[in-house]
Image (cartoon, grey):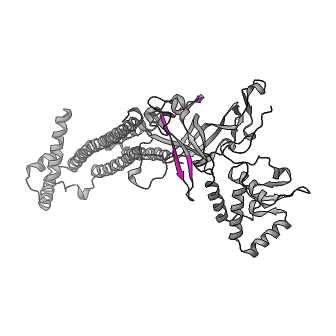
Amino acid sequence: MPINLVYDPPFASDDFTSICESWMSNIYEFYSQSSYDDLTEAAKDGEAFYEFYCEDDLKPGADFYRARACQEYIRVYYFNDENATTTYEENGGKCSKYFGDDYEMEPKLQEMLENLMFRSKFTALDVEAGIEIQSINEVMIHESSMDSTIIIYLSWSDPRLIWDPKDNNQIFSIYVPYEKIWTPPIEIVNLDKYLNYGIIFKYDAKISNNGDISTLVKMRVSTSCDITQKLYPFDLQECSIEIATPILDTELLNFKVKTWNSMQKNPVGRGRNETNYYETDLASVKNTFFDDNPEWEIAAFKYEVSNSVNNINQKFSKLSTTFFLQRQIAFYEITLLLPIVCLNILVCVGLWIPISSGENISYQVTMLLTIVVYLEVLSSSIPVFRELGNAPQLLILFIISIIASVAAMIILAGTAWLHDKQYDQMYCFSRGRARFAYYSAKLYQSIHGDRYLIPEVILKCLKHKIDNSKERLAINLEMKKSSEMDPDDWNIAWRFYGKMISHLCAICLTLCVSVASLSVIITIHMKNNTGKNKFQTSP
């Protein structure tokens, strides 16, 4: 007995006569009598049934009418079965999904057909489905997508393909090309684009003598992800691959994961349609030839079978597989985090360089330009965000560095101005400045033990307990005239005062930068550890 292949889906009836009769009457009612007659005549003249996208070039003597074209159209359009060989095609008729660029079926008529199909008494086909991942090629944060190579496996039963091995030379299974039999018309719902030039490898389908069919489809795809960028580059991402059959209602086809459930950790039951991260076993989703990604590691995964509804209220089955991805951070710790921490340290160290060296301002400008270059590298790797609250924590660390660098340049500019005090302002040294310089020096001496040689001008200003600026200026000028102090002594006092200000600002800026940087780094690691608990701990 020969083994005959079938092209129709297992849930399809032998013909669609009743559906076509109802639908054609709807077509007749949809058009006015005159317009329908014109359409019929045009179809005859062009030898085509335009309302069904069917070309009609029948053999002489063949008696096939619009009803046959309707049935052929349903096979092609609704079941995606463009390889079916029917009596209509054998006699010269041919239907396709689209007929010409200037004609489209009325959406209302298409909706009528779908409603008729949904009301048909078909038995829903259960399709065992699952995904194996061969490689995570790249997670593109800037594009909010994941590039991966996946293998989708499908299995179902077709009682029409049952045979007795005794009658077929003890053949228990055969392999046939994917295109030679009907296969579920799956789609990747969250697909961005096919990669690898759009090449899709469809493996031969295995058909067992009991009617069980299994096949594999391999492809490289870019799928959209809901990217979380706040912890970049210490982030944890959840990316999904969603497969469905949008053209087939749940009354016709449903995904099942009983086989996949049996491969997971306990207590996943065979009848469950969803799992959590802590329940699944990575070995069940990684292909035998899985290639590790140097940047991303699959920490866990979960899957769920659910029903989705499209815009015309058609319910279809969908299998969502979500991967919990953890970035390998060693590279970014060395190339991003460590340099920015070092730059923060160098910005603060620059305030301790003596102003007399003349390199302070240029040093801080160099630091600022270096930070800006790193900021440019970072901004090219992350997507645009609308609110500051969504900004990556590492970006905030860069902003802290920029603010610190600008503040350091302002402090150094003020210190340089005090260092080169002009003659017309030299004698405006107040008692308040003298007190600040004196007690600051005492504080620093108590901290590091070194003694400061406090200028004589500052000590004399402290003796004159006058805070009024005019009276203070008069006393200073009197000191100048009496030759108690020459101009160099006043310059030394101003420089000493500037140095004390510079030291105080350096201490404050160092503390502020250190606290801000540590808080950002601690926040990143705490949130990173919190995210890991999602798959490490059961509720």
Instruction: Please name whichever residue, 371 or 521, is drawn nearer the observer in this view of the structure.
Output: 521
Which one is in front, 369 or 112?
112
Q: In which quarter of the image is the N terminus?
A: top right
In the image, residue 303 lies in the stretch drawn in magenta: yes
Instruction: Determine if residue 455 is in view.
Output: no
State which region is magenta: 289-317
Q: In this view, does 34 lie to the left or right of 215?
A: right
Q: Position of residue 105 (x, y in %)?
A: 70, 63
The residue at the far bottom in this view is 34
Residue 283 against residue 473 in the figure, above or below: above
Q: How many labels does the image show?
A: 0
Quadrant in which the C terminus is drawn? top left
Q: Main secondary structure of the magenta part?
A: strand
Q: Is 443 placed left or right of 24 in the picture? A: left
Residue in the foreground of this view, choosing between 405 and 80: 80
Give x and y (percent) for residue 16. Answer: 71, 54
The quarter of the displayed image where residue 468 is located: bottom left
Residue 52 coordinates in the image, percent (x, y) = 75, 60
The residue at 68%/42% (across/down) is 183
- Of the pair 423 and 202, the residue shown nearer to us: 202
**x%, y% of residue 419?**
28, 49
Q: Does the magenta stretch include residue 495?
A: no
Q: Is residue 415 left or right of residue 37?
A: left
The reply to whether residue 82 is in sight is yes
